[in-house]
Image (cartoon, rainbow, N blue to C red):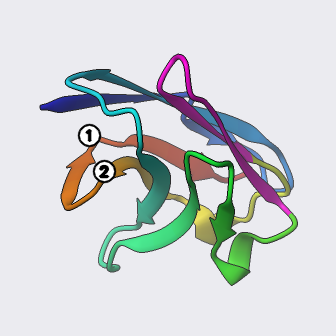
Amino acid sequence: QVQLVESGGGLVQPGGSLRLSCAASGSTFSLYTMGWYRQAPGNEREFVASITNGGNTHYADSVKGRFVISRDNAKHTATLQMNSLKPEETAVYLCVYWSGRLEYWGQGTQVTVSS
């Protein structure tokens, strides 16, 4: 089992920035991809960004140019730098860890964008 713990959520004003972190522990793998999804009340879970072992990144169109995902392979952590945040991006942000067919999810961290 892989355990994921997210941190860094909170309240931010529109146009502001937040930095989310996700730490993986337990039976981690040498080859894995980490990513972020978000889910707002009443909405389906939405892909935000992902990053592979080799550092290849993928972003949802809605966050390109504003969000940056990075990782530390040695520490099994992933970070999501979110800039120019919008009120409609208020959601629970969830970390996900993939290795082969295995998939693990964190509990999520709340991000609220409001003045």
Q: How crowded is mark 2: few (under 14 residues within 10 Å), some or many (20 or more)?
A: some
Mark 2, secondary structure of its residue = strand
Q: State the image quarter where residue 100 is shown.
A: bottom left
- In the rendered structure, does residue 73 fall within the stretch colored magenta? yes
- Residue 49 is situated, as x and y percent measured from the top left of the image, at 59, 62
First in sequence: mark 2 vs mark 1: 2
Q: Quick check: 71 left or right of 29?
A: right
* Residue under label 2: 99
At mark 1, the secondary structure is loop
Residue 68, compared with residue 101, is above or below; it is above
Q: Is residue 83 left or right of residue 45?
A: right
Vertical placement of residue 110 versus 57, above or below = above
Q: Measured from the top left, where is residue 22 in percent x and y?
A: 47, 31
Mark 2 to mark 1 CA distance (whole Å):
18 Å
Position of residue 14 relative to residue 29, above or below, is below
68 within the magenta span = yes
